[in-house]
Structures are given as C-alpha cells and as structure tokens.
Amino acid sequence: MPRRVLLEDLHASLGAVFGEFAGWSVPMSYEGTLKEHMAVRREAGIFDISHMGRMLVSGEGSTELLERIYTKRVSKTKVGFMSGPTLALNEHARVRDDEMPYRLGEDEWLIVPNAAVADSMLSYFRETAESLGLEVRIEDLRSKYALLALQGPKAADIVEALGGGDLLGLKPLQFVRGVELAGVKLELVSRSGWTGEDGFEILAEPQAARALFSKALEAGAKPAGIAARDTLRIEAGFVLGGHEYGEDPKKWPCAVSLRYGLGAIDWGKSGFVGEDALRACRREGVRWIRIGLVMKKKYARMIPRQGYRLYVDDVDVGWVTSGTYSPVIGRGVAQAYIDSRYAYIGDSIEIDIRGKRGEAKIQEFPLVPLGVKTA
Amino acid sequence: MASDLLEVEVAGIKFKLDKSLKYTESDEWVRVEGGVATVGITDFAQKELKDIVGVELPEVGAAVKAGDTVATVESIKATAEIYSPVSGEIVEVNEKLLDAPETINEDPYGEGWIFKVRISDPSELDKLLDFQSYIESVKKRKS
C-alpha cells in the first residue's frame, strides 16, 4: 500500500486524481495537468509536496557530516539560507540525490531529500555519521510537518494578498522561521521552488498547512498536482533521480555529465564521498553530457520519452532521460544525454520515436521563457 | 449521438458509453455505417490518458488487419497505441486531431473519432463487445 500524504482529504475534496509516486499516493492532478502547468507559468499554483523527505540534522558534528556528503562547501552557507543545489554522490561518482540543505543554525540543518530516496538518505546520513564518529542527531520530520510549494510569477502577489508583505523581502534561497501568514502559524517559509518560477516553499504542521493551502486558493492560486510538477521541472531543466541520474554506473554517467547547477560541484573542495571517482571522470573527459531538446515545428506533437534514442544519420548518439509536451511552446520537449562530440547547442538531432524519426533542436535550459506574468 | 449516452461508474471512475456502439478490450469504440467502421477511443480511455496532446494517424488507403496498431495517441502521461478493430482499408482519418488532439478528451464519441476502415470481413464485427461486455472488461481490469 502506498503511503498517504497528510493532506489527502483536502486534495480529495478538491477533486484530485491520485496516483502513485515513489511509494506515495499523491495528488497527480486536479483540473488537468496542462491547465495547472500554465497556471504556474503565468499566474500561481500551490503544490503539496509532502511526499518528499524532511530531516533535521543537528549537533556538533552536523556540518562536518554534510561536508563529507555533498560536493559543495555547504559550510559557506549562511544561517537563514539554503545552500545552492548540490549533490550527494556514491563511491562511483554517481548521484544518490540532489539537495539544497537549509542552514537553520551553525550546527543545525534541514535536509529535503527526494521522495524516492528519503528513507535511504536517512539511513545513509546515520551510517555516515556513525562511521565518522560524529555527534549528530537525525530526526525524520515527515509526520510532523507538511511541505507546500506556492509557485509562479504571481506567487508573491498571493503572499502579499494573504498579509505576508514582510516575506516579499526574502531573497532567493533565504528563509524565515516561525512566521504567520493569513493568520496561520508556519514553521518555515523559504524563497525557493522546483518550477523555475518565483515562489515560496512552506513547512507547517498539518492543520496549518491545510488552512494555508485553502487560503492560497481563495487568494487565486490554482491547486497543482505532481504531474504538472514534473512537466514544469523538465522545461526548467531540473533533474530527477531515476531519469537524469541514479546510483548505478551501468545506467548513468558520472555526476560531471549532469552539468548540474552553478557551483553544485566545488572542485576546490576535498574529502567528500565519491571525490576520487569524480575527479577521474573529469580528467578522462566527459563522454556524455546533459542537454535540452525541443521538437521542431513539423514534429511538434511527437513526444520524446525516457529511453528513446538519439541519432545522427545511423549513429546512435544518446538517449532521452525525461520528456513531455510543453504547453508553453506547444512542442514536445526533453532532457537527454548526448555524446559530447555531438553536443552543439542549436544543432538538430533525430530522435527515434517508436520507429519514426522526429527532428529536435539541441537547446540550453530552460527550454521555455520563465517569469512571464499575465497582466 | 448524445441521445444514447449512458453514464457508468467503475472503481470510482465515471465514464460515458454509447449503447449503440461496439467496443474492444483495448478501449476502442466502433460505429458501423454502410460497411465502414468509424473508430475512436472510449470515454474511459480518454479519462485514463487525461491531457491528450498528440495523435499520429494512419495513411488513407493503407490495408490493415484486425489488431494492427494503426494510430497512436499521446498524452502528457503516456503513449497509447490504437488498434484497428477490424480488417480492411483506411478510407478516412480525422486530420482535425493533428491540430486539436484535445478533441478526443472533449468529445470522444463524436468529433474525437480517429479513423474509418472499409470493412473487408464483416464476420469480425461479431467478435466486438457490446456496451455491457465492455463494462465487464473495464471492471476486470480495475479490480
């Protein structure tokens, strides 16, 4: 049986269609993925992302533990900010998870692992702390707090309408704790998200999260499901485990190929898990590189999906890792790994779509314009 | 056509059926008129697929056998293959769907038809399901 999110009853009352994702029963869509997607790109949408992990890592050894786990120098992150995106690798320099640790205090961190690895990251943190003999407490907060994401170019307008004018001063990746919004007490509000749009992520006790979700809807946000969250992140160029990365070196190239986020890997840093393999991979030169693909007009409604192969004439030069239809530009779009010798931005490439070739253009992320607000 | 629509519910999913049509286990509907079968996908199928964003149609004039994949329907969620319920020749395809594939979501038994086949072996029609058997088939899959 899949696990249930804390606000399941609320989503059901909003007419959500549920589906299983990473072992959780999640609201996949409400009115329809295309509409929800456009609401987030042009106005505002609110997601319940409580299927994701939430763990509190605290104690004297906590920052040292994080430095061992991540490819970025997270100790440079100021209290009150999330680190930029970074990676937790295994010994093969393959990615366990991509995360943005929140620095709650000098020695106190909130980690939000992806849903599929939330359990394994908990035990990985515990085991790593133990093997290093570090003084660390790790607490699973998933049943204590729900996690919401209010996203879109009008997210700030919604927050303001709810009386949260003070929160508009939050810089990207900055957060505050113990605030009230629309009379609802929230544990933490950050200026962050996973859609490529402006927005806020909110940690709150279930009753408070329920109240805030409803108030955001009254203020004009649309409920948005996990299916739209996926199509939005594909356009924005954000990566997902099981698609763009995974731990198996036979299935995924090393983390350098991911070309993930500015500064996600700090080459000046040493002593993190997977470092030797990562440096070796960089020295050898990157064979595969992650790029974006947009179907050409003639093939606009052909949808590249995970596993479809890329071709130059009869040479197989890569594979699609995630694909969907972009309602913003009316084209099939994808993320893919391509042999780096063929990775010319702006060049065209063929994709084998169930035995037929469709042409796509190699493009940099994001694949659509972001931050476009309707009047 | 709307006159014959029946609303049913299986495992919490509500969908409409046209009593006058024939159906397949793979969720196509068939309307037979003058030796030509018009084919589309059922309301149940479009609800399962949800947001339909693309359709690939067969060539007019193509010879098809019952059970051949002749079209595909792309939704945000998945790609569905559409099989010809009968053997014969493709005589018409619904080209409007190329620009407006969402018509299948909006009007699956009407404007959302996909292709027409001139039937070469009328005995194949006997293997198709009536609406009651189709409901049973959906129930079996959803249980």
Image (cartoon, coloured by chain):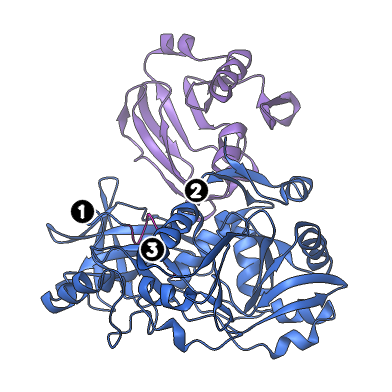
Q: Residue A342 lies in magenta, yes or no?
A: no
In the picture of the structure, the residue carrying the numbered disc 1 is: A250
Disc 1 marks a residue whose amino acid type is: Lys
Tags 2 and 1 on a common chain: yes
Residue A288: % across, % down: 21, 68
Nearer mark to the viewer, of 2 and 3: 3
First along the sequence among labels 2 and 3: 2
Q: Which contiguous range is marked in magenta? A: A238-246
Q: Specify few, some or many for label 3: CA neighbours under 10 Å numbering under 14, 14-19, or 20 or more.
A: some
Disc 2 marks a residue whose amino acid type is: Ala
Residue A56: % across, % down: 58, 67
Residue A234: % across, % down: 45, 65
Subunit ID for the residue under disc 3 = A
Q: Quadrant of residue A226?
A: bottom right
First along the sequence among labels 1 and 3: 3
Subunit ID for the residue under disc 1 = A
Q: CA distance from mark 1 to mark 3?
A: 25 Å
Subunit ID for the residue under disc 2 = A
Q: Quadrant of residue B6?
A: top right
> Does residue A46 sit above or below B52 in this rendering?
below
Q: CA distance from mark 2 to mark 3?
A: 24 Å
Q: Which chain is blue?
A: A
In the picture of the structure, the residue carrying the numbered disc 3 is: A128
Q: Nearer the viewer, residue A115 or B60?
A: A115
Residue B107: % across, % down: 64, 41
In the picture of the structure, the residue carrying the numbered disc 2 is: A22
Q: Nearer the viewer, residue A46 or A272?
A: A272
